Amino acid sequence: MNENLFTSFITPVILGLPLVTLIVLFPSLLFPTSNRLVNNRFVTLQQWMLQLVSKQMMSIHNSKGQTWTLMLMSLILFIGSTNLLGLLPHSFTPTTQLSMNLGMAIPLWAGAVITGFRNKTKASLAHFLPQGTPTPLIPMLVIIETISLFIQPMALAVRLTANITAGHLLIHLIGGATLALMSISTTTALITFTILILLTILEFAVAMIQAYVFTLLVSLYLHDNT
């Protein structure tokens, strides 16, 4: 209980070398390319889920937007697997780092916006000024729409960081409370342990949902610009 509450969010280091690169690359080992005629159950389930998500997410896009399918599916696999691996004991979750989430959000958002300005210049500029705006409000609305545009990647990154970090902190706090209560009241400790199990199950769902929400919002930004 003397351990710092935020120790689990510190980047792991061995011999002074950060292990973030290895941790980020590790989830790719969980999705091998199958060269068999008949796939095993894991690969079959993986392909079915990818087809289901891609069909739901990319059905609203035109031909230009559908060229992003591989990138978006890789993104949801990476974020989902990283979030799930972070729930393992004594593990590190890269998606709790705001800098990493910004590193994913900003390039994808910028790519979608630049695509919009290249392919739909007039429509993209029209978003800054809604039709029928009174003349005195034009400067203010342009400023507000510009701020709302540039705040989109920050909202993406902060949403993912906050949800994953909050879940990890709750698990840490309730787990510590359970250990402390075992020597005081066994009944109360069992109740808190049950809450801990339910919260862990909820965090598994949150890990997948946040990966889907992050990718879906990037997909919607792309749809608005293609």
Image (cartoon, grey):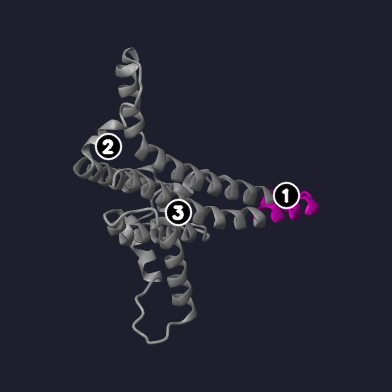
Q: What residue is drawn where x is 46% and y is 49%?
A: 213
> Viewer-proximal residue, 11 or 21?
21
> Viewer-proximal residue, 114 or 80?
114
Judged from the image, the secondary structure of the residue bearing numbered disc 3 is: helix
Q: In the figure, 72 relative to 156: above or below?
A: below
Q: Which of the two marks, 2 or 1, is nearer to us in this view?
A: 2
Q: Earlier in the sequence, mark 1 or mark 3?
A: 1
Q: Which residue is mark 2?
A: 123
Please identify the residue farthest to the bottom as the structure is shown. Answer: 37
Q: Which residue is mark 1?
A: 181
Look at label 2 and name its amino acid.
Ala
Judged from the image, the secondary structure of the residue bearing numbered disc 1 is: helix
Q: Which residues are magenta?
A: 179-196
> Within 10 angstroms of label 2, few (less than 14), some, or many (20 or more) residues?
some
- Does the segment drawn in magenta span residue 6? no
Q: Which residue is mark 3?
A: 211
Look at label 3 and name its amino acid.
Ala
Is residue 219 among what the camera can see?
yes
> Viewer-proximal residue, 12 or 61?
61
Judged from the image, the secondary structure of the residue bearing numbered disc 2 is: helix
Whether residue 218 sits left or right of residue 115 in the image: it is right
Q: Which of the two marks, 2 or 3, is nearer to us in this view?
A: 2
Whether residue 154 sits left or right of residue 87 in the image: it is left
Q: In the figure, 158 relative to 73: above or below?
A: above
Q: In the figure, 46 relative to 130: above or below?
A: below
Look at label 1 and name its amino acid.
Leu
Q: Which of the two marks, 1 or 3, is nearer to us in this view?
A: 3
